[in-house]
């Protein structure tokens, strides 16, 4: 008999430590305000940066794609699952990212599993920022390459480690673009220079950068003016684009190669017409106007500044991600619970998503929050902060 009680004890232990995630169920679509447990709450924790998850233009495009293509792709891409809709989206996404070519995949998580193992293996080395996203870490592990972690954002350390580990068939440098828990940005310009100097491939995962950084939200590569210089640019359709899915952008050889070798492409069915139809509309919305991206930044800058003057520690974010640092996991989850009572939905994030002793409430500001919404949030943060003697 398998001892399920051991698992139950572990769950109890997580609860005691404030590390148990209470999953909230939404009873309304994504947006600035949500209905949860019958209660109307201000949403401060989705990745729906631009409000596109429930945008009329995307919904219309998605419904049209379903009308035209049905609901499922019917197969993996390499057998019978490639629709011309997929190829149209791949062209649009490549253009949006300033890359030669792109490949759609089921999710951003899968994108890292799709791209890392075909490119590097046992004879190779991966140089990975120590705070890279779990999906990068898993992709690296799956590849069988030796993983060398460099200190977070520290390009001197990266270069040192490249120098001390010269012998490999291939060397791959990989980093998040925007780090999702702290909102800091990889120094991709310096990383590209180091990659060129030491003949290493450079890969970035731009999940929190696209729709946020660069002109019209084109992402971190455009932000640093590096089009054509980053070998592998991983994207997600699940954050600012408001849909679900992932993609890889790069030169046409990379994409052609991945379409022969990437296991999630070969062995898992293609993204659905509904998703792809919506993403096409998202890209077109961004290409036609930077209004939403500008609104996102002005909202975020306002919120951060006001939180600081209230006396909160908001870390060192360079993007709209605003970590309200509380450090102690129990205090953080208590803070989140009280905020919810006050009508603000902002989840506490603790270990293993962030390091032990670095618990926080991660506030995600969006372009669809009004000034009134933000004032409401600030007032409630102040109330709970004082109640818990934190400010
Ligand atoms: C969220 C995230 C992913 C996963 O993207 P999905 O499309 O939700 O699977 C991958 N990488 C990074 C850096 C992320 O922040």
Image (spheres, rainbow, N blue to C red):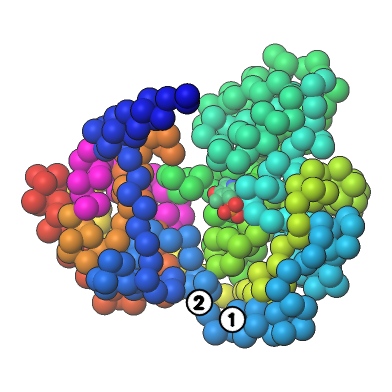
Quadrant hosting residue 8 = top left
- Where does the magenta region start and end? 316-337
In depth, the one of 367 and 10 nearer the eye is 10
Which residue carries the number 2 mark? 54
Q: At numbered mark 1, what does the secondary structure look like: helix, strand or loop?
A: helix
Q: Is residue 26 left or right of residue 166?
A: left
In depth, the one of 249 and 85 nearer the eye is 85
Q: Does residue 255 appear in this view?
A: yes
Q: Does residue 355 appear in this view?
A: no
Which residue carries the number 1 mark? 59
Give the residue at x 32% y 28%: 9
Residue 161 position, x and y percent, is 65, 20
Q: CA distance from mark 2 to mark 1?
A: 7 Å
Give the residue at x 74% y 77%: 70
The magenta stretch spans residue 297: no
Q: Is residue 353 above or below residue 281?
A: above
Give the residue at x 80% y 27%: 121
Residue 190 position, x and y percent, is 65, 39
Answer few, some or many: residues within 10 Å of disc 1's Cα (few below 14, many 20 plus, some between 14 and 19). some
Labels 2 and 1 touching (C-beta < 8 A): yes
């Amino acid at each position: 008999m398998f001892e399920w009680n051991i698992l139950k004890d572990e769950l109890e232990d997580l609860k005691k430590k404030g590390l148990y995630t209470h999953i909230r169920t939404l009873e309304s679509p994504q947006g600035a305000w949500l209905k949860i447990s019958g209660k109307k709450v201000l949403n401060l924790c989705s990745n729906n940066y631009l409000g596109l998850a429930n945008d009329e233009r995307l919904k219309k495009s998605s419904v049209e794609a379903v009308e035209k293509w049905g609901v499922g792709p019917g197969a993996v891409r390499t057998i019978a699952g490639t629709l011309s809709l997929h190829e149209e989206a791949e062209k649009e996404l490549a253009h949006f990212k300033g890359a030669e070519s792109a490949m759609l995949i089921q999710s951003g998580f899968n994108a890292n599993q799709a791209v890392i193992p075909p490119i590097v293996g046992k004879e190779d080395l991966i140089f990975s920022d120590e705070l890279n996203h779990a999906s990068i870490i898993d992709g690296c592990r799956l590849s069988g390459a030796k993983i060398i972690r460099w200190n977070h954002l520290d390009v001197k350390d990266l270069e040192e480690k490249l120098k001390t580990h010269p012998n490999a068939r291939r060397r791959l440098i990989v980093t998040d673009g925007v780090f999702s828990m702290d909102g800091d940005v990889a120094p991709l310009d310096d990383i590209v220079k180091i990659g060129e100097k030491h003949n290493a491939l450079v890969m970035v995962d731009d999940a929190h950068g696209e729709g946020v950084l660069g002109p019209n939200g084109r992402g971190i590569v455009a932000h640093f003016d590096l089009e054509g210089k980053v070998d592998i640019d991983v994207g997600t359709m699940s954050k600012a684009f408001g849909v679900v899915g992932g993609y890889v952008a790069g030169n046409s050889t990379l994409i052609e190669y991945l379409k022969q070798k990437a296991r999630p492409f070969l062995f898992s069915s293609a993204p659905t017409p509904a998703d792809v139809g919506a993403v096409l509309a998202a890209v077109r919305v961004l290409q036609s106007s930077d209004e939403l991206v500008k609104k996102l930044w002005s909202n975020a800058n306002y919120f951060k500044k006001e939180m600081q003057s209230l006396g909160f520690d908001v870390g060192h974010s360079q993007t709209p991600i605003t970590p309200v640092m509380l450090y102690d996991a129990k205090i953080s989850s208590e803070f989140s619970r009280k905020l919810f009572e006050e009508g603000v939905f902002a989840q506490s994030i603790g270990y293993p998503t962030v390091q032990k002793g670095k618990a926080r409430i991660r506030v995600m500001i969006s372009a669809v929050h009004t000034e009134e919404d933000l004032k409401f949030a600030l007032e409630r943060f102040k109330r709970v902060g004082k109640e818990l003697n934190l400010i």
